[in-house]
Amino acid sequence: MSTSRASPRAAACITPDASPPSIGLCSANRRRPPAARTDNDRDRSAERGIQAKRSPPACPRAPAPILRACASVIRSGKAMARRSARVVLCTASRLLAVGGLVLGMATAAAQTPSLQALSAIAETPAATKVYAARDIITMDPVQPRAQAFAVRNGRFVAVGSRTDVTAAAGPDAELDQTFAGKVVVPGFIEPHVHPILAALTLGTQVIAIEDWDTVAGRSPAVRDAEGYRERLLHALAAQHQDVGGPFVTWGYHQGFHGDMSRAFLDSLMTAVPVVVWHRSCRELYLNSAALAQTGIDADLVAGLPASQRAHIDLEQGHVQAQGMIAVLDKLAPLLAPPERLRQGLELTERYYHRNGITLACEPGAVLSKPLQQAVNAAYSDSTTPFNHCFIADGKALAARHPPTSPGAAGALIDATRRLLSRGEGRTRYLPRQVKLYTDGAMYGASMQLQAGYADGREGSWIMEPTAFDAAFQAYWDAGYQIHVQAVGDGGLAVLLASLEQAMARNRREDHRTVLAHFGFAAPAQVARFAALGGIVSANPYWVEALAARYADLGIGEERAHSMVPMAEVLKHDLPFSFGSGMPMGPAKPLQLMYAAVNRLTGEGRIMGEAHKVPREAALRAVTLGAAHSIQQEDSIGSIEVGKRANLTILEANPLEVPSTWIKDIPVWGTMLEGRVQPAPPPPEEAAAAPAPQQQARPAAQGAAISR
């Protein structure tokens, strides 16, 4: 093999061989908390079963509700598109829409290789490839830079100077120049996404405060009320003219786009249902036609508990929080039609790949088995360009199995363990990890702030503190790593109280309790959390999107500058990662880096200069730090011998370009377990709306559209 232009720079780390990887994620973790190292046989057998590649399960053979039909549609569509990997014929024999329910049947068949072919595959020796690049950033503290690396059986077998890697790889190794001139970093890891919500929202007409890649194409940002109303009017007119039917849009935010109401929507459209889905995903506005079609009326609301009635305002057409949960079955036909879910999940697959993600993880995965099957149908086959893991939703599980006694706590843990069997192929649940919640959302401005809001409103709880603590203690005693979504400092106070009690009662080392989102925190709170052994999973994108506007919307200038206070995290040397919570933010690791390094808002202001994060620390937060946050750092997150060969390939070095360029660095593609995967092209701009001069003013247009 040619070794021209090789110059020694660092000794190669070499290994004589590496075991072939199974499809999925490595379950080994030497630094796992002691309680987690004693996984029982059910956990371990479930992990082994999840890692093994399975054939896609047959589509449902009996009528099923809408979400099960979603899985059928997704599985059939994706299998047909991937005959090169496996011939799978999954034909929907009938789809019946009855009152918002879709019933599906399908059949599946797979091509089976001959025994001779399998024997030949088994006897073929593994090839070794040597790759060199312009820059290789390893995130390995022992060897932070390298000139080359070698890959065999999907793992790194040598990393170091080109000369030493070439020698270690052996004379039969192949020199691959694919990455010549590129910048190679460990595969990006997104530890916080929500694929179902992302699929459903990005499958609508998106009019949001930031740019989005959607099913329809590229949707540019709108950050003012006049621009939002113009876009909304154009989108309504275009849909009414082209396809008709219900209209759903996502991305509205009152702090940018002005007031919203049933009367305003009726002024635009009365003939068909219109739903405006709030940017937070926790609120909706409906016009009169949408309320009528869903059956959400005064009689229905009167029969609900007071806590749910308080969150439904029929006069305004406003449904939120507990009220939205109460009528979700009524809303599902409008928000979650199977085709939208299928198209949305296919979009997220391209989206993650285009942005260099090699592992995505959902903390708080939905409990619905049909929905999980829909995600598996989209992501689990071997040709998917990333792995995807899930963490159980302890909030929903604790609501079904309240841990009110030791026996009840055991039932809660058993129910959580049973979820381990739900993954397949490239999707899997992580054992002994769970997500809980304290306070409300950042986009809805409903987080709990200890000093209150300047405009007098109050925050909300997703889990009441007593219910949160009961679930926290039950999972703690079972040895779980607990991920806690706490947005405001009031929510963090609840987490700290429970964690301090747990540590005093049953001390655990390396428990890695995760503070997820990390919107607002007092310095003393961060110091306490660090002393207790916690870690942070922050969303720095919130600063870019919201900080400047929130300074004028009840948060105040001083607190807005301290949103996502990373200076305190760095001061106390807390391990940290970055996660978008997509669709709470774009799942773009380079944009998360950009936001943390610059803290530059959409309005052009720098908010919280003291909280800027150094570039290398930001890169670690989307690679090795992210792997550490979900206990996967022994197998991914850095370029080291023995780890899975997962890489993100960039056209420029994020540690060297001007800091404001970081988010715009092109992603060439990825490597997943040794497989080179060029990124798909970016989407085209969404179809242009009708020109304004072709439309009447909103009130008149509403009457015209209604006809």
Image: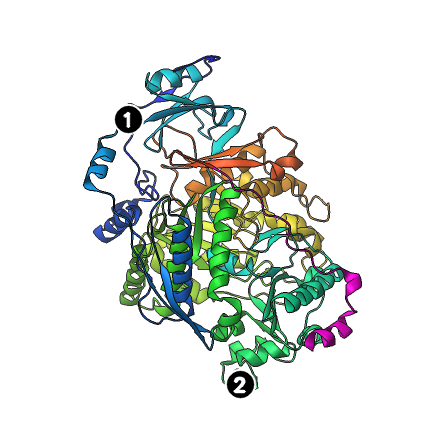
Q: Is residue 692 magenta?
A: yes
Q: For the residues carrying marks 2 and 1, which lies nearer the camera in this image? A: 1
Seen in the picture, residue 220 relative to 16 is either above or below; the reply is below
Viewed as shown, does residue 330 lie left or right of 231? left
Q: Position of residue 582 (x, y in %)?
A: 53, 53
* Secondary structure under the numbered disc 1 in the rendered image: loop
Q: Which residues are magenta?
A: 678-707
Near-viewer residue (394 or 21): 21
Residue assigned mark 2: 302
**In the image, what residue occupies the spot 67% across and 53% down?**
221
How far apart marks 2 and 1 lie (CA) works out to: 68 Å
Measured along the vertical axis of the image, is residue 569 above or below residue 88? Answer: above
Name the one closer to the observer, 448 or 613: 613
Q: Amino acid at mark 2?
A: Ala
Judged left or right of residue 407, residue 654 is: right
Q: Is residue 567 visible?
A: no
* Disc 1 residue crowd, few under 14, some 14–19, many 20+, Cα 10 Å: some
Q: Is residue 519 visible?
A: yes
Query: Is 446 in front, or is 206?
Result: 206
Q: Residue at x 60, y 36 (%)?
A: 665
Res. 17 mark? 1
Residue 309 position in % (x across, y down): 54, 79
The quarter of the image holding the C terminus is: bottom right
Q: Is residue 71 magenta-colored?
A: no
